[in-house]
Image: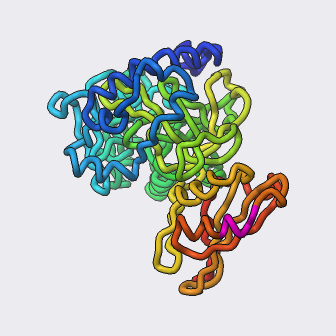
């Protein structure tokens, strides 16, 4: 028995790409029928969007834009193609940001990470994501229903009841945050309760350091896989395992197009380079076209040992919004990108802010092939023109800057 949910996961990569690109025009047209997307995609001919290059010409709508969009056009910013009164759930996340859920099966596409950890029909799941206002618990519910797994709707907190439930109802798996699973295991030990039925866990919503995964494995839960998702998109990517060993990276969901772009821009970066995760989602109720998650990651080359052939990412690698205040003025990654665009000789740049607060020094480190081809004084003037701040320029060779996706580095001393 394999852990594949369906044959889509092992498609020839070229076939998957053809299928996704062929679906793009209909997605764009469906999105444009919603008033918010009609404004964002004004003038776009849906039938022309049939390739990644064409898609990359469309604007990025970032998660950070949602609050303003939704305030202007309640409740979902005009981005849903299904009226609010025809949805299954309406969620409210901190911000507040409102998220929809339609009535389709496994609407958040959560069955894939659950199948990857070995869950099958009849396995009992203790769902310890919150059922209060936010969608994570309902993502797991949708995946469980698709697989045919009964759910214990445990939610968060009430640790003793969590242990009692595990001891009496014998769930096969835990779904929730990794830190709460550790708390439950410790409480079970304190109570002398047997929760050994829990052999699998799908965890998310927070980081899973290797030390915590090992602790969970050493303390009775040998199969611990993490998934990466968001309240807007649902499952984005998930870990897999082969013969009990966790495979490198996370496999992208089948119904998404992934781009990694330079923070502050919509420009895709080369595979392996760290940048912002931008997702195009084929959700029929909530189509998302070039949705910037604000999260950083990078494409991991090669195919997973598990046999799934979709793109892998390295997982969550920080936040893309690196906006920094310098001498009482905000400097944005998009401004750094604007400087670089004016100088084709600059391959990559990073603005480093040093000194102490109120005595800031901005230095734009620029990767170039030949320093003689770049007039540093001209770049200094461009920095001043775009940011309204004085900045210095340092020219460095290609490959000198770290591959961490940072466009602005705040290296000031705050003591």
| Residue 268 position within the rendered picture, expressed as x and y whole percent measured from the top left | 60, 40
Residue 151 sits inside the magenta stretch: no
| Residue appearing at x 47%, y 45% in the figure | 293
How many marks are shown on the rendered structure? 0
- For the residue pair 328 and 15, the one nearer the viewer reads as 328
Give above or below for 393 relative to 79.
Answer: below
Q: Is residue 325 visible?
A: yes
Tell me which residue sits at (43%, 18%) in the image. Answer: 47
State the quadrant of the N terminus: top right
Residue occupying the point 18% across, 34% down: 84
| Residue 286, position as x, y percentages in the image | 32, 31
- Extent of the magenta region: 375-380
Q: Is residue 181 visible?
A: no
Give the percent coordinates (x, y) of residue 296: 57, 49
- Horizontal arrangement in the rendering, residue 59 relative to residue 312 (left or right): left
Which coloring applies here? rainbow
In this view, which residue lies farthest toward the left? Answer: 85
Whether residue 362 is situated above or below residue 211 in the rendered picture: below
Quarter of the image where the C terminus is located: bottom right
Q: Residue at x 56, y 12 (%)?
A: 7
Q: Is residue 376 magenta?
A: yes
Main SS class of the magenta portion in the image: helix
Is 231 placed above or below 118 here? below
Asked if residue 288 is positioned above or below residue 328 in the image, the reply reads: above
Task: Give the x, y percent position of residue 49.
Answer: 48, 23
Q: Nearer the viewer, residue 162 or 410?
A: 410
- Judge by depth and name the residue closer to the eye, 377 or 215: 377
Name the image quarter holding residue 170. top left
């Amino acid at each position: 028995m394999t852990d594949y949910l369906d044959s889509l996961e092992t498609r020839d990569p070229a076939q998957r790409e053809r299928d996704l690109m062929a679906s793009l025009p209909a997605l764009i047209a469906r999105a444009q029928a919603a008033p918010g997307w009609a404004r964002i995609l004004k003038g776009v001919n849906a039938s022309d969007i049939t390739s990644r290059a064409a898609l990359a010409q469309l604007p990025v709508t970032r998660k950070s834009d949602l609050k303003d969009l939704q305030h202007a056009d309640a409740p979902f910013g005009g981005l849903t193609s299904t009226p609010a009164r025809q949805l299954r759930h309406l969620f409210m996340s901190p911000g507040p940001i409102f998220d929809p859920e339609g009535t389709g099966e496994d609407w958040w596409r959560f069955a894939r990470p659950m199948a990857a950890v070995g869950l099958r029909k009849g396995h009992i799941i203790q769902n310890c994501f919150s059922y209060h206002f936010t969608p994570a618990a309902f993502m797991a519910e949708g995946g469980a229903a698709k697989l045919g797994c009964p759910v214990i709707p445990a939610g968060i907190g009430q640790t003793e009841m969590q242990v009692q439930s595990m001891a009496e109802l014998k769930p096969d798996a835990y779904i929730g945050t990794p830190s709460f699973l550790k708390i439950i295991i410790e409480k079970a030990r304190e109570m002398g309760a047997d929760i050994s039925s829990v052999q699998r866990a799908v965890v998310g919503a927070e980081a899973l350091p290797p030390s915590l995964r090992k602790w969970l494995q050493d303390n009775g839960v040998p199969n611990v896989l993490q998934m990466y998702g968001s309240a807007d998109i649902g499952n984005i990517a998930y870990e897999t395992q082969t013969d009990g060993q966790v495979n490198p990276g996370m496999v992208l969901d089948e119904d998404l197009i992934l781009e990694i772009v330079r923070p502050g821009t919509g420009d895709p970066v080369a595979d392996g380079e760290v940048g912002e995760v931008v997702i195009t989602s084929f959700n029929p109720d909530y189509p998302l076209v070039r949705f910037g998650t604000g999260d950083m990651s990078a494409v991991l080359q090669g195919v997973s040992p598990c046999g799934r052939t979709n793109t892998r990412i390295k997982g969550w690698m920080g936040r893309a919004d690196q906006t920094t205040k310098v001498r009482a003025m905000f400097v944005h990654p998009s401004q750094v990108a604007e400087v670089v665009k004016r100088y084709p000789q600059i391959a990559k740049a990073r603005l480093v802010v040093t000194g102490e607060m109120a005595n800031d020094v901005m230095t734009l480190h620029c990767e170039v092939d030949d320093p003689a081809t770049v007039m540093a004084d001209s770049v200094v003037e461009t920095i001043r023109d775009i940011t309204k701040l004085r900045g210095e320029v340092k020219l460095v060779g290609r490959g000198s800057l770290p591959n961490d996706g940072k466009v602005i580095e705040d290296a000031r001393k705050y003591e």
